[in-house]
Amino acid sequence: MNANSTDFHDLAQEIKTLGQSLGFQQVGISDTELSEAEKQLADWLDAGFHGEMNYMHKHGTKRTRPNELHPGTVRVISCRMDYLPESMSITNELMADPARAYISRYALGRDYHKVIRKKLQQLATLIEELIGPFGYRAFVDSAPVMEKSIAEKAGLGWIGKHSNLINKEAGSWFFLGELYVDLPLPVDQPIKDHCGHCTDCIDICPTQAIVAPYVVDSRRCISYLTIELQGAIPEHLRPLMGNHIYGCDDCQQVCPWNRFANLTVEKDFMTRHQLDTASLLDVFSWSEEDFLRNTEGSAIRRIGYVSWIRNIAVALGNASYDPDILVALNKRENHPNPIINEHVRWAIEQHVAALHEVTT
């Protein structure tokens, strides 16, 4: 069999079967027409909602025109894979404990970029075995790709009011990955929006970053503040961040569709180094060497040690008064890095003020 003699309807079904055999929960196929998403992105960028994420506009229309990013692309094979490592009841308990370090559930295991990319390459290789060489390129959240808009067109779900993709049978706790291909495969049909009148995600957002249904101001989003933002976190937002030190899952936690979410069966997404239950004091005590060792192979490592300590200092400042916390903060009060120094001093001020309230 070769691409010229292929029955593309049969091939599309075979691709979906092969994808599931590799561990993807669902595979869909879309065309490359993203004009509506292109306009929405332009409006979002014009509003400045991307903050310091300058890469969101540096590639021009390559993000919304797949053929410009990878010439010859006529279809996108979109794949999703569940990543939730534990029940949401456990997650709720951790979020509610101000002494615990809350890390977004997607980052507890091995770096998803590596896991998903490997599986996409395996899928491409299996397709080549069926039809011979063809044009393709794999992407996993590391290039200018409108992954959620593409997945929506491919029938994997709909984009919810929190801007994450939601699936009726699986909620939103999943990763996405794409194969841009030059094969004229039949496309899948989009699923209609099932958010209805629900605003739970908007209401729960600690920093009110969802400024309108389907519109997130990244500059207020805890995920942006703890991962993307370099430098100081705006002081007025720090008290709203609670114990979140890397990312934020609040909007997913309250989404009614996530009652259908499935726990991951992928071993690489299981928790490493007990980061699901670590205390703030434990991770705050890490040296840079500890940080590099404990985040090896993890998506967390990309924020670097300075942002890691910065984030934890804010969370410690939000914790209930504890003399042990104050002792730990004082040890770093004169840290040579100005970002760490600023956030540690802010946290100390919060505990000194709390102590004053207790003693007066």
Image: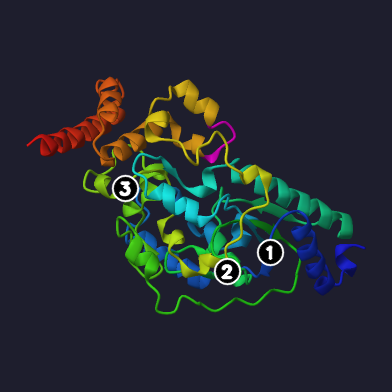
Tag 2 residue: 167
Distance in Å between CA atoms under marks 3 and 1:
34 Å
The amino acid type of the residue labelled 1 equals Gln
The amino acid type of the residue labelled 2 equals Asn
The answer to if 298 sits in the magenta stretch is yes
Check the image and tell me how it is coloured.
rainbow
Query: Would residue 127 be found to the left or right of residue 331 on screen?
Result: right
Corner quadrant of residue 29: bottom right
Mark 3 or 1, nearer chain start: 1
Above or below: residue 319 compared with residue 38: above
Q: Which mark is residue 26?
A: 1
- The mark total stands at 3
Above or below: residue 94 compared with residue 195: above
The answer to if 271 sits in the magenta stretch is no
Above or below: residue 28 compared with residue 102: below
Distance in Å between CA atoms under marks 1 and 2:
10 Å
Query: Would residue 343 be found to the left or right of residue 259 on screen?
Result: left
Is residue 232 in sight in this rendering?
yes
Tag 3 residue: 241
Q: Position of residue 304 (x, y in %)?
A: 44, 32
Q: Where's the N terminus, which quadrant? A: bottom right
Corner quadrant of residue 4: bottom right
The amino acid type of the residue labelled 3 equals Met
Mark 1 or 2, nearer chain start: 1
Marks 3 & 1, CB-CB < 8 Å contact: no
Tell me if mark 2 has few (under 14), some (14-19) or many (20+) residues whose alpha carbon lies within 10 angstroms of its own.
Answer: many
Numbered disc 3: secondary structure:
helix
At 31% across and 34% down in the image, what residue appears?
Answer: 313
Q: What is the magenta segment's predominant secondary structure?
A: loop
Q: Position of residue 197 (x, y in %)?
A: 40, 79
Query: Would residue 347 be found to the left or right of residue 253 on screen?
Result: left
The magenta region covers 295-299
